[in-house]
Amino acid sequence: MGVFFDSFDNTLSASVLAALLKSGWSTLELNSLFMSVTFAGLTVGAAAAGWLSDRFGRRFAYQFNLLIFGCMAVASAFAPSMHWLIAIRAIMAVGMGAEYVMGYGLITEFVPPAQRGRYLGWFGLFAGVGVFVTSLVGWLVIPEFGWRPMFLIGGVGTLWVWWERRKLPESPRWLERIGRAAEAEAILQRVEKEASLSGPLPPFVVVPQTEPRYIPISVLFSRPMLRRTAIAIVMMVVALFGSYTLSGWMPTFFVKQGMSVTRSLGFNAAMMGGWIAGPLICAAISDRIGRRWGLVVFGVVCAGFGAVYPFLRSDELIVLGGFLLVSAVGSFLILASGCNPELFPTECRFRGAGLAQAVGRAGLIVSPAIVLALFNNYGIGGVIGALAGAYLALALLMAVAGVETNRRSLEALDPSAGPDPTQGTMLSPVRPE
C-alpha cells in the first residue's frame, strides 16, 4: 500500500500538469520545472534512504519517508500558486524517493531466493496499479472537480498507510550484521511461527554468524564492487528515464497535438493499464528466466515496440501499441529495481541501491529539457525513438556483463563470499548460529 500511494502521488503529475496547462494556471516551462524539482527531490530521497536504512535501520527509514510525502501531498492541495506548488513538490519528492529503495530492498531481504522474483513482481503490481488508478482517477475527477483533490486523495491515503505500517518488523539480516543477533532471532521465530501455520517448514541452512562490521560507501567503488555498482546505475538510469517519460509526458504530448484534456486523459488511462500487465508478467517468469536475462529480453521488446509506435495512426492502434509498450517498460523497470538491491552486501545494500536510484533520478532532473527538445524538433517519434535506443543498448550490456542473481542467496551473492551453501534449494531466511 505504501508503494501504491507513492506511485499515485508520483504519477499524478501527468494528469495534473496537463490540466494546469490547459487552464492557463501553468505553462509548459513551469510544468517542466515542476518535473525537474520532483526528480531533484526523488534523488535526495533515494540517497538519504540508503544512508538512513543502513545506519538506523530499515524500519525507521521506511516510516520516515511516508510521513514526509503524506504531509506535503495534503499541503499541495492548498497551494495558492504554481510557484508554491513547485516548492511544496520539491519537499514531497524527498519522501517519495525513498519508497522504491526501501520496498524492493526489504522484499529482497525477507523473501527466500527461489521466490524473490515472484514477490518482486507482486510488489511491482501495486506500483503499477497506482499508476493506472492515478490515470483513471484523474480522468474522472479533474474534469469535474479540478486538480486539487488529486493531491488530497494521495496525501490522506499515504498518512493512513503510515499509521498502519507502524508495526513493521525490522530486517533480521540487518540486525544480525550489526551485532543485534538476539533481536534478529526473535523476529525470525515470529516469522517461523506464522509460516508454520500453513504447513511444515523446509530445513534451514545454518550459516556462521559474522562479526559486526561497518562498510564505508567507498566500498561501492572498490574493485570487487565497481562492476556491480556501474551496472546498477546504468540499469536505473535507463529504466527510470523510460518509465517517467511515458507516464509523465504522454497526456501533455496529446494535448499539445490538439486533443482535449478529457480525451487525452482517456487515452493515457487506457495505455497505463500496461503498468498492471507488466508486473503480472514479471511475477510469472522472473524466477524462471532470472533478472539478468529478463532485462535482456524486455530491453529488446521495449526497443521493438518503441521503434513501431511512432508510425501508428488510428486511435485503436495508438492505444493498443501504447499499452504493449508500457507493459514492456513496466516489466523492465520492475526487473531492474528488483535486481538492484540483490547486487550489494547487506551492510551496504540500501546505500548501493539508493546510490543507483539517486543517479538515475538525478538524470531525470535534466530529462524534461531533453524530452522537450526531442518533442519540439522530432515529435513523439523522436522521444520514443531515443528511448528505444537506450533500451537496446542496456539489453546488450546485460547480455555481455550482467550478473545473474536468480535463485541465489544474498550471502552467496556477496562478492567476498565463498561457495553458496544454499544453491539449488528452496529456503526460509538464513538462520545465524
Image (tube, rainbow, N blue to C red):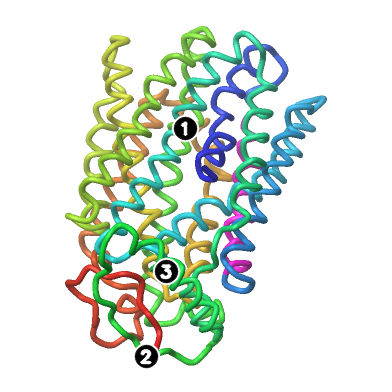
Q: Is residue 217 above or below residue 299?
A: below
Principal secondary structure, stretch drawn in magenta? helix
- Specify whether 278 is left or right of 132: left
Q: What is the three-letter code of the residue carrying label 3? A: Thr
Question: Badge 1: how crowded within 10 Å, few (<14), some, or many (20+)?
Answer: many
Q: Nearer the viewer, residue 369 or 8?
A: 8
Q: Nearer the viewer, residue 102 or 332?
A: 102
**Which mark is first along the chain, 3 or 2?**
2
- Confirm whether residue 40 shows in the render: no
Which range of residues does the magenta coloring cover? 30-53
Give SS at disc 2: loop
Give SS at disc 1: helix
Q: Which mark is residue 131?
A: 1
Q: What is the three-letter code of the residue carrying label 2? A: Pro
- Confirm whether residue 89 shows in the render: yes
**Which mark is first along the chain, 1 or 2?**
1
Q: Is residue 391 above or below residue 151?
A: below
Q: Which mark is residue 229?
A: 3
